[in-house]
Amino acid sequence: MGSPKHIATAVVLATAALAYVSAPAAASAFVAWQVTNVPWGDVLNARKYPSSGSQIRAPIRTAPCCR
């Protein structure tokens, strides 16, 4: 069997790993939003950061449920 120091280290690492995995994410997520002035059939581009030159992450097409 391992030494008490190795066992204590393993317990600490296992506890830290469990806390890391079970902790909630620090980043927030969109729950809901309302878009106005996007014409029917147009596309709203969700971008990486707020700039017209930013990378488009997801084009969101207008639909009856989103009006």
Image (cartoon, rainbow, N blue to C red):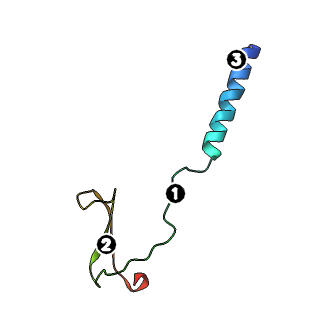
Could you tell whether 46 is left or right of 53 in the image? right
Q: Looking at the image, can residue 15 be seen? A: yes
The image shows residue 12 at horizontal and vertical percentages of 69, 28
Which secondary structure, mark 2? strand
The image shows residue 67 at horizontal and vertical percentages of 39, 84
| Residue on which the image places disc 1 | 28
Q: How many residues crowd mark 3 within 10 Å: few (<14), some (14–19), many (20+)?
A: few
The image shows residue 16 at horizontal and vertical percentages of 65, 34
Which residue occupies 52% across, 57% down? 28
Mark 2 is on which residue type?
Leu
| Residue on which the image places disc 3 | 6
Mark 3 is on which residue type?
His
Q: Earlier in the sequence, mark 2 or mark 1?
A: 1
| Residue on which the image places disc 2 | 44
Which residue occupies 43% across, 84% down? 65
Which residue occupies 45% across, 73% down? 33
